Image (spheres, rainbow, N blue to C red):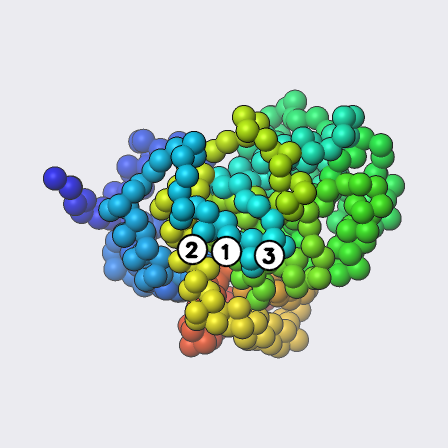
C-alpha cells in the first residue's frame, strides 16, 4: 500500500538535510512542495513566481498537464526495459527530434553531462587515428562528469580534480582567428554552446558560428553544438542553431527536453552516427518509456500551443522592459535576450538582487557573479511576466540606490 508523506516545514526540512544529505549545494532554506505553471508554493503556503523553473528544465512550467497525463499513463503500463529491446515510444521520440532538426539519429541518456560525454566519445571514434583534440571555449559549461568538466573551460570548476582528461584545448570566446590558430593535425572537433548559459547568456556573432562551420568543413572536423540549455524552443526556434543558420554535425540536448522529467539526447548526422557502434557507449535508463512519453508530450505541447512564437513575444517584453530600466539604472551594463533566455549584466555583484527577489517571492538566478539569469517558462502569461519584471526592476533599483 502506498504511503502518503506529510510535508515537513521548511525548518524541519533544513534539519533533515543537515543530517542525511551531502552538502554539495548551497540551498535556499525553503521547502518547495507544489507547482503549477510559473507558480510554486512552499510548505508554509507561500506563493512564488518562478522565473527560473527547474534550473531551466521546466520549459513548460511546473507540472504541465499534458506531460503529467503522459507520464501517468506510461508509468501504469511500462516503466523500464533495457535498451537491448525495442520500444516504439523511444523510436517515435527520436523521429520527432530528427524531423524538427537536421535529420540526424538519436542516442538517449539522462542528462546534459551524459549527452556531452557521448558527443566527445563519438567525435573521437569518428575521427581518423591520431585526431583526438577537441577545442572548447572560455566561459563555456558542459557538465560535471570528468570529460564534460574538462571540456568546461573554467578553471574554478577544475580545482582539486586533476589530472583531467587529456586532449582539450581552450579558446577565447567569439574569436575566429584564435580558433583558426589552434586547429592542428590532431584536432578532431570543435565543441561550443551556441549561446553560453552558465557563462552569462553570452550570444556570439552569427559570423563567428558560420566561421566555425567553414573551419570544420575545411579541415574535416566535427562541429558539436551543446544545446542542453538552448534547445527545444528556448530561443524561439526548435533549436538555437536554426536561429543562427549554422547546422552542427552533433547536437546535445537535456534540461527542458522532457518537460521536467530527467532525459538527455545526442543527435548526430546519419554519416557520423554509425561510429558510435555497439558496445562503445550506453546509458541504462536512457530513452526509457517514461522519459520518451514525456519528451513526446513536451514537443507536442510546444507545437500545439504555438509556444515558439510565444517565446519571441516574451523576449520582446523582457528586452523592452530591462532596456528601459538600463537607461534609468547605471549599474545595468547590458541586457541580452534570446527567446526566454535572458541575461542582465550588472556592474556590481548580483547576489543582493537574488536575495531581495526571494523576499518578494520571485525566484531568479545569478551566474558569473554579476549576470541576472532568467529562464522563464515558454507558456508564462504576459501578466505573470509583468508581475515578475516589476519585482526584479525594483530590486535592481534598490541595489542602485
Marks 2/1 in contact by CB < 8 Å: the verdict is yes
Q: Residue at x 56, y 57 (%)?
A: 99
Q: Earlier in the sequence, mark 3 or mark 2?
A: 3
Between disc 3 and disc 1, whose residue precedes?
A: 1
Q: Secondary structure at mark 3?
A: loop
Residue under the point 63% across and 55% down: 102
Image quadrant where one finds the C terminus: bottom right
Do labels 3 and 1 touch, CB within 8 Å? Answer: no
Picture coordinates of residue 161 (x, y %)? 60, 26
At x 75%, y 61%, the residue is 206
Say which residue label 1 marks: 96
Q: Residues within 10 Å of mark 2 (few under 14, many from 20)?
A: many
Asked if 192 appears above or below 324 in the picture, the reply is above
Q: Which residue is mark 3?
A: 101
| Viewer-closest of 348 and 122 | 122
Whether residue 344 is visible to the viewer of this picture, yes or no, is: no
Q: Which mark is residue 296?
A: 2
Pointer 3 local density, CA inside 10 Å: few below 14, some 14–19, many at least 20:
some
Q: CA–CA distance between discs 3 and 2?
A: 15 Å
Amino acid at each position: 500500500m502506498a504511503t502518503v508523506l506529510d510535508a515537513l516545514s521548511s525548518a524541519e526540512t533544513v534539519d533533515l538535510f543537515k543530517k542525511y544529505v551531502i552538502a554539495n549545494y548551497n540551498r535556499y532554506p525553503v521547502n518547495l512542495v507544489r507547482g503549477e505553471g510559473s507558480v510554486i508554493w512552499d510548505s508554509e503556503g507561500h506563493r512564488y513566481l518562478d522565473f527560473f523553473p527547474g534550473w531551466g528544465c521546466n520549459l513548460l512550467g511546473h507540472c504541465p498537464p499534458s506531460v503529467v497525463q503522459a507520464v501517468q499513463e506510461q508509468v501504469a503500463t511500462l516503466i523500464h526495459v533495457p535498451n537491448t529491446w525495442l520500444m516504439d515510444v523511444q523510436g517515435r521520440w527520436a523521429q520527432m527530434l530528427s524531423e524538427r532538426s537536421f535529420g540526424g539519429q538519436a542516442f538517449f541518456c539522462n542528462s546534459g553531462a551524459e549527452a556531452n560525454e557521448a558527443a566527445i566519445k563519438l567525435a573521437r571514434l569518428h575521427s581518423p587515428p591520431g585526431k583526438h583534440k577537441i577545442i572548447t571555449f572560455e566561459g563555456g559549461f558542459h557538465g560535471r562528469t570528468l570529460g564534460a568538466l574538462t571540456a568546461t573551460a573554467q578553471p574554478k570548476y577544475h580545482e582539486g580534480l586533476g589530472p583531467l582528461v587529456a586532449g582539450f584545448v581552450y579558446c577565447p570566446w567569439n574569436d575566429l582567428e584564435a580558433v583558426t590558430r589552434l586547429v592542428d593535425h590532431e584536432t578532431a572537433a570543435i565543441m561550443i554552446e551556441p549561446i553560453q548559459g552558465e557563462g552569462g547568456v553570452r550570444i556570439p556573432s552569427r559570423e563567428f558560428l558560420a566561421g566555425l562551420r567553414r573551419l570544420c568543413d575545411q579541415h574535416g572536423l566535427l562541429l558539436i553544438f551543446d544545446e542542453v540549455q538552448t534547445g527545444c524552443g528556448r530561443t524561439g526556434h526548435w533549436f538555437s542553431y536554426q536561429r543562427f543558420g549554422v547546422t552542427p554535425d552533433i547536437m546535445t540536448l537535456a534540461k527542458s527536453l522532457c518537460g521536467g522529467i530527467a532525459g538527455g539526447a545526442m543527435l548526430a548526422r546519419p554519416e557520423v552516427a554509425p561510429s558510435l557502434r555497439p558496445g562503445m557507449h550506453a546509458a541504462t535508463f536512457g530513452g526509457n518509456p517514461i522519459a520518451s512519453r514525456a519528451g513526446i508530450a513536451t514537443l507536442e505541447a510546444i507545437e500545439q500551443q504555438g509556444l515558439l512564437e510565444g517565446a519571441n513575444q516574451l523576449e520582446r517584453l523582457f528586452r523592452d522592459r530591462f532596456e528601459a530600466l538600463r537607461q534609468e539604472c547605471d549599474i545595468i551594463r547590458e541586457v541580452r535576450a534570446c527567446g526566454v533566455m535572458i541575461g542582465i549584466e550588472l556592474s556590481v555583484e548580483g547576489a543582493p538582487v537574488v536575495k531581495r527577489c526571494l523576499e518578494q517571492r520571485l525566484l531568479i538566478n545569478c551566474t558569473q557573479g554579476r549576470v541576472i539569469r532568467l529562464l522563464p517558462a515558454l507558456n508564462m502569461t504576459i501578466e505573470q511576466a509583468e508581475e515578475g519584471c516589476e519585482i526584479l526592476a525594483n530590486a535592481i533599483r534598490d541595489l542602485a540606490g
